[in-house]
Image (cartoon, rainbow, N blue to C red):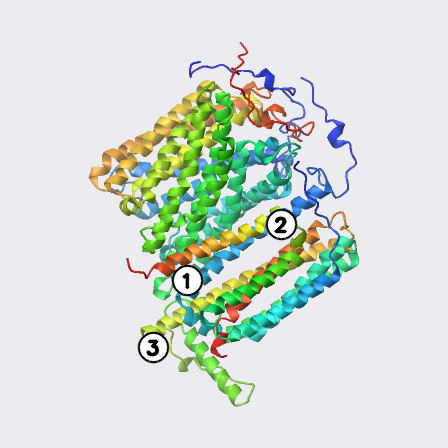
Amino acid sequence: MATAEHSTHQPAPLSLYLATFGMLMFLTLLTIFAGFQNFGMWSTPIALGIATVKAALVVVIFMHGYSSSPLTWIIILASMFFLTIMLGLMLSDYMSRGWAM
Amino acid sequence: MSIVSLETKTFEKFADVPSRNDDVNYLSHDFSITSWLFTLDHKRIGLLYLVTITLMFLLGGALAGAIRLELLTPKGDFLTADTYNKAFTAHGIIMLFFFLIPSIPAVLGNFLVPLMIGAKDVAFPRLNLFSYYLYFAGSVIALSALLLGGVDTGWTFYTPFSSTYSNSYVIVMAVGLFVVGFSSILTGLNFIITIHRMRCPGLTWFRLPLFIWGMYATSVVQLLGTPVIAVTLGLLGVERTLGVGIFDPRLGGDPILFQHLFWFYSHPAVYIMILPSLGVTSEVIATFSRKNVFGYHIIAFSSIAIAVFGFIVWAHHMFTTGMSPYAAMVFSLLTFSVAIPSGIKVFSWLATMYGGSISFDTPMIYAFGFLGLFTIGGLTGLFLSTLGTDIHLHDTYFIVAHFHYIMVGGAVLGYMAGLHYWWPKITGKLYSQFWGKLSAGITFIGFNFTFFPQFILGYLGMPRRYYEYPDEFQVLNVFSSAGATILAVGYLMPLVYMPYSFFFGEKANSNPYGGSTLEWTNTTSPPSPHNFEKTPVVTEEPYHYHAKEAAVVSH
Amino acid sequence: MSAIKETVQDHGQHHHKDLAHHFDTLEQQHDANTLGMWAFLLTEVLFFGGLFAAYTIYRYKYSAMFEEASNHLDITKGAINTVILILSSLTMALAVRCSQTGNSLWTGRWLLLTIAFGLMFLGVKYFEWKHDYHIHLMPGKDWSGKDYWHWQYAKKAKDMETEAHKNGSAEHSLPNRKDVLADNDPSLGVRGIQESQQARLFFLLYFCMTSLHALHMLVGFVLIGIIAYFAYQGAYSPDYYSPVENIGLYWHFVDIVWIFLFPLLYLLGAHMGH
C-alpha cells in the first residue's frame, strides 16, 4: 500500500528539548575550547566532529528525526553523501596536483 | 504491416472506460483565460509548459540556423566574431535550460505522472503552478539578456573570461538561469513526493511504469544538482561585481574551481535531459511491440544508477584544464562505468522487441531513431572519456557531434516519441500517421546529415566555437549545413499537423495504441479534470502483454 | 457519448476542512508536506554546499593565511551568536510542540520569540559588520581594481587595537590610509602580495557565507511571522500542524548551517593565540 506512515505523534516531553539544549550549549563551549588548543592536523576533524554531533542532536531531537520515516533518513543521508562527493572529489584534484607523474 | 500503413488500430480489450468525455474533460470544463493562467490542474500546467518551451525551441533553432548559415563558408560572412559567440552561447543556453531540461519533465511528466500512478494530482499543485511561472519569468529574464546585447561566454561561462573580461550581459543571464533553475528544482521535488506518497492502492514500486522510474531518477538529479549551479552563478555575479578574485588567477583565485562547481551540476544536467527520454522509450517500445519490457527490474535500477553515477564523473569535461592527472584517471574510470547502465537499457529494449509484434506507428519510428542515435552518441562518449584521445578531441567538433547525438538524436527524439505517443490522451485527437512518420523520417535523415560530418570534422581537428575555419573543412561543413535545413523541415512539420489534429483531427478513444498502463486503461481521452472516476487498484505488473497476443485490428 | 458523472465513492465523504482535495487522508497530507520540506532542505544543503566547497578548496590551498585572516573576526560575537541561534532553535522546537498539543496561544508566542532571537543574532552581526566596514574588510566597489589596500589596513588596525589593549585603553583610533601600503605594493614582495590576496579570499567567503545565511534568516522571519499570525487565529490543531512543523525544520536547518560556519570561519586560527 502506498499510504503514509504514521507521522503525527505524541509530542516529546519538554525535558527532552531542554536537555538537548543544554547538551548543545555544552558542545558549543567545547567547540570554543577545542578551537584554542593546538591539535595540529587534527584540529579540523575535531571541530567538524563536534559540529556534526551538534547537528545530529538538532536533527534527531529538534527536527523529530527520531520519529521520522526511513525516507526522511534517506534524504538526510543523501545530502551528506553527495556533499561529501562534491567536496571530496574536488579536493582530490587539488591535493594530487603536485604529485609527480 | 507496412511502415506507411495509415490504420489506427482499436484495442478494445484494453479500453474499459467510456472512450470519450466531451462535456467534462480537463480541456473543456472551463475555457476562460483565468482558468488556464491560474490553473492548479497538472494537465493544464503541462500544456502551458508545452506552449512556452515550443517557442523557446523555435528560438534556439533559429540561432542554430544562424550558426550553420555562417559556417557554410570558411570566412566570416554575416556574423562578426563577437556576434557569432553570442549566437552559439544563446543557442546553448536556450536549448539546454529552456528547452531540453524542462521538456519531458514539465510537459509529459506533469501531465502523466499523476495519471500513471492513479493520483488525482501532484503532491503540491500550487507549487507546480509556481514552478511554471518561475520558468516563464526565467525565460523573460534570459530573453532580456539577449535583447540587451547577449552573452558571449559560451553556455559554460568559463572564468576568468566570464568573470572578468567579458563585456556582455552575463549577470542578467545568470539571474535568468538562477530563476529557471528553481523551477527545475521545484518540479523535481514535486515529482519525488508524488511518486513516494500518492501511488494508488496496489501500486508497489516494481509495478510502476518505467517512465515513472525515469521521472523519479530525473527528479533526484534535479534536486541534488541544480542548487550547485545556482550558487555558482551567484559567485560568478559576485566576482563580476566586486572583482575580488575568487576565479581570477591574477588575484589568487582558481578559474578551475569555477569549472568544478559548474560541471558538478552541468554533467548531471545531461542526465536530467536523457533519463526522461529513456523512460519514454521503455513505454513506447513495450506498447508497440506488444510485449512486456525485458528486464524490468534492471531497467528500473539502471535509471537510479545513472542518476547516482552521473554525479561522480563531472571532471571529464576538464581533462585538458591542467587538473591533476591522477584525479583525471579516476574520473575517466568512473565515466566508463556510467556508460554501463545505459548499455544495459539498450540491450533490454532490443530483447523486448525480439519476438514481439511490432507496429511502426510514429512513436515507434522515433523510438527506433532514438535507439540508433543514442547508441552512437553514447559510444562516442567513450572516446572522450579516454584521456589520451580526449586530449586530441576536446573542444573540437567531435564533442559537438557527440552531445548533439545524445541530446537531439536521443533526448529530442525521445520527447517527440512521447508527444506523439500520448497526444491522443492529451488532446483526445489523432494526428495523421502519414505526416507523423514522414516528419520522423525527415528528422532522422536531416539529423544524421547535420551531425555525422561533425564527427569527422572534429577528428580532423576543426575547433568548436570558431566562426571561421581552414578551407579544407568546407565540404563537410556544407554537408552539415545542408542537413540542418532538412532537419529544420522535420521539426517544423509537427508544428503544422499536431495543432491541426488538435482542432480538426479524428477523435481518439481512450486507448488507441493498446497501452497497458493506467493512463490508457483507466482514463478517458482527454482525461476528466480529476483524472479518475474511481481510484484504481493495481494488481499486476505494468506491461501485461502476453506472448500470444496479437494486435486487434478494427477493420 | 454520455458525460461521466463523478461517483460518490471518492467525493461523497465529508472532508476535513484542512484536507486538500488531492490527498486522501490528513496523515498522507502531513507526511507529504513534511517530506516536501525535507527534500527542499536537501537542496539547501547542496546550495550552501557550493560555498563550503569553495571554502574547502581555498582553505586547503591557503591554510596559513586563512588562519591569520580568521583572527580578525570577533570570536566573542560569533560565540554569542551561536548561543542565540541555538536558543532560537529551542523556542522553535517548543513552538512546534505547542502546535502538536493544540496550544495556539503559546505556538504563536514561541514563534515570535524565535523571531526575536533571530533579530538579536542579526543585531550582533550588524555590529560585527560595522566594525569590518570601518577597517575596510567589507567587500565593496573599492575591492576591485588596482588600488586595493584592505589587508594591509586591516593588519595595521589590528596591531593598533592590540597596542591599545596592552596599554589598557579601550579606545583606539583607526590607522591613516596614508600610513598603509597598498595590498599589491611591490615592496611587499611576491609573498606579501599573495598573502593579501589570500586573506581577501577568506573575507569574501566569510561575507558570502554569512550573507547567504542571513538572507535565509530574513526569509525565515517572514515565514515564521505569517505562520505565527495563523497560529494566533487558531488555524493549527493536532490534526493539522504541518506549517509549524515545516517552518521548524527550515529554521533548524538555518541553525545547523551556523553550527558549521562558526568553527570553520571563526575558530580556525584561534590556536595561534588571539
Parent chain of label 3: C
User: Are discs 1 and 3 both within one chain?
Assistant: no
Residue labelled with disc 1 = B246
Q: Which one is in front in this view, the residue at disc 3 or the one at disc 2?
A: 2
Question: What's the distance in space between the residues labelled 1 and 3, CA to CA?
Answer: 21 Å
Amino acid type of disc 2?
Met
Q: Earlier in the sequence, mark 3 or mark 2?
A: 2
Q: Position of residue C103 (x, y in %)?
A: 79, 56
User: Are discs 1 and 2 both within one chain?
Assistant: no
Q: Is residue C218 visible?
A: no
Q: Position of residue B285 (x, y in %)?
A: 48, 25
Observer-nearest of B371 and B91: B371
Q: Which one is in front in this view, the residue at disc 1 or the one at disc 2?
A: 2
Number of other residues with Cα within 10 Å of mark 1, as a class: few under 14, some 14 to 19, many 20 or more: many
- The tally of labels here is 3
Residue labelled with disc 3 = C188
Parent chain of label 1: B
What is the secondary structure assignment of the residue under circle 3?
helix
Q: Is residue B381 visible?
A: yes
Q: Position of residue B191 (x, y in %)?
A: 58, 40
Parent chain of label 2: C
- The residue depicted at 52 percent of the width and 64 percent of the height is A48
Q: Residue furthest bottom?
A: C167
Q: What is the number of the mark on residue C37?
A: 2
Question: What's the distance in space between the residues labelled 3 and 2, CA to CA?
Answer: 51 Å
- The residue depicted at 42 percent of the width and 36 percent of the height is B342
Amino acid type of disc 1?
Ile
